Amino acid sequence: MTLGILATIEAKSGEEARVEAELTKVVAPSREDDGCLLYTLTRDSQQPSRFIMVEQWRDRAALDGHIATEHYKQMAQSLENAIEQMEVREYDVLT
């Protein structure tokens, strides 16, 4: 079954531009990862410090492969001190 991910990332005050830049950099290579069906970055129109990554993966193995990539690891490391909080929710994609 296809695995959906909604990752909500809250940038620290003053770090919004940095967070946006780092998240944007990971989109293109992530879309090339094996098993990636959808990978897009959005920003909350009412709260500009909140970013939402919308992802769909063929299966758990594809998501695990993505998390093991160098581009994902670099993004996570570069944002370590720029994020106030992050919530990652997993969903079964039905349609």
Image: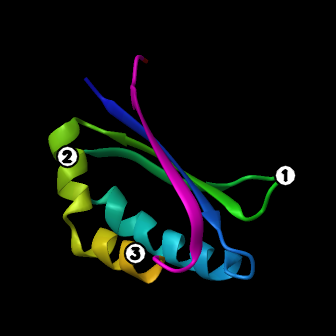
- Give the structural element (helix, strand or loop) at label 1: loop
Q: For the residues marked 3 and 1, what is the alpha-carbon distance in whole angstroms?
A: 25 Å
Name which residue type carries label 1: Gln
**Disc on the earlier residue, 2 or 3:** 2
**Disc on the earlier residue, 3 or 1:** 1
Question: Label 2: few (<14), some or many (≥20) within 10 Å?
Answer: some
Question: Label 3: few (<14), some or many (≥20) within 10 Å?
Answer: some
On the image, the x and y values in percent for residue 95 come to 43, 18
Q: For the residues marked 2 and 1, what is the alpha-carbon distance in whole angstroms?
A: 32 Å
Residue under the image location 39 percent in, 72 percent down: 76
Residue behind mark 2: 62
Name which residue type carries label 2: Ala
In the image, taking residue 16 as reference, residue 32 lies left or right, namely: left
- Magenta region, mostly helix, strand or loop? strand
- Give the structural element (helix, strand or loop) at label 2: helix
Q: Residue furthest top?
A: 94
Residue behind mark 3: 75
